[in-house]
Amino acid sequence: MNVIGMISGTSYDAIEAVALQLTLRERTVHARLLGHVSVPYAADLRSRVAQLLPPQTTTIDEVCRLDTLIGQSFAEVAASLAQSCFSGDVDVVCSHGQTVFHWVENGHARGTLQIGQGAWISEATGATVVADVRSRDVAAGGHGAPLASLIDVLLLGRRPARVRGALNLGGISNITVVGPSRDPIAYDIGPANALMDAAVTWLSDGAQTYDREGSSAARGRVDEVLLAEFLAEPYYDAPAPKSTGKELFHLKYLTSHLGERQVSHDDIVATLCELTARTVAREVRDQGVSELFVSGGGTRNPVLMQAIRRNLADDATSISLIDDFGIPEAAKEATLFALIGFLSVQGLEGSIASCTGAQHAVVLGAIIPGRQLITALDESLAPVNLVFETEGSGEFS
């Protein structure tokens, strides 16, 4: 099956998309990567998305307009990728869209909203489109996150001989943990890049939107008093499963902790970098992870990665990139949604209840029919393994 997976993450800077050929044989999904693109949002659109996100307020007409504009942007990327990789013959597109609000109250997810109308994608490509992928899990009592646990468990194994973890360092850090005598678990840890990005954007008056190669954090020194205040955040001690986002970790959250304190720009970024490293290391240590596989934009920040390794130096934890499984780190999230779309159109569950906190696993997403109907499969064929192939690379499992 020819499938495209798409997402714009919590940094809302680009549309990530992959083109995959997916097959299901003997309960193993075989994935061949044919294309991966990262297409930045137009400057005006990105600015409007920024004005929509918490703690900003907005209007319903702006939500409607952006739902269309983001949908059209995703549609343009999908149509281009379908043409270049499949000569226009794409069966399924799964679009995560853009998260604009994730409603968590008293430790429970009450709702989640991703915009980017999928009808535009279906019209542009003729494909069956799977969208609104998180809401069904929330309705089943889950957090709708981390959905990456699906791909993590398929890659790491549901019950491996040793405890293994998959860490994603996006706007928010999340972890999936599997082991020999436990059900898989997954949860959001806290801010990975969200607060650092907010700080850099604010301190540079928008000239920069992230700490490129960790240069600011490298120049700065950690303010231990300020760091202790950040670490006192109650979310970190909340039990899993749990989820969070920029509804909590945003610029006003940062400035409220700074108060009247005089801290240099670089010291602020260095402190936030250390916050991410320490919160991640605590969870990796508490879960007893012996092998950790990392993905997300944070892997391209050498100062952050060094800080994580330093905080885990006394633990027997090996740290590698998810690329070891054949999936390019930058393509992992888009690959996840391609996999979800592939399963959903065939009536197969795409969530793991023990990871999201739902009462049961569910088929994810709302389906917009394409030119051809796709036949559902027997649920007994649901995959238990994922093998990823790239051109000339052989197979990874």
Image (tube, helix red, strand yellow):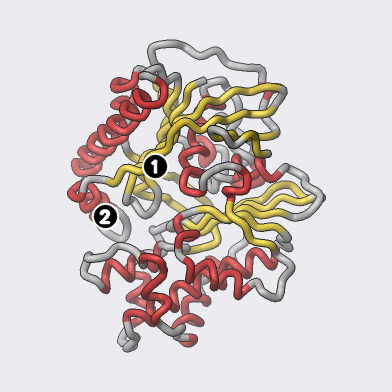
Q: Residue at x 26, y 58 (%)?
A: 56
Disc 2 packing (10 Å; few <14; some 14–19; many ≥20): some
Q: Residue at x 38, y 73 (%)?
A: 215
Q: Residue at x 73, y 60 (%)?
A: 290
- Which mark, residue 16? 1
In the displayed structure, 391 sits above or below 190; it is: above
Q: Amino acid at mark 1?
A: Glu
Q: Earlier in the sequence, mark 1 or mark 2?
A: 1
Q: At which x and y percent is residue 360? A: 64, 36
Whole-Å distance between the Cαs marked 1 and 2?
18 Å
- Which mark, residue 320? none
Secondary structure of residue under mark 1: strand
Which residue position holds label 2? 50
Q: Is residue 122 visible?
A: yes
Report the mark closest to the observer, 1 or 2.
1
In the displayed structure, 59 sits above or below 376; it is: below
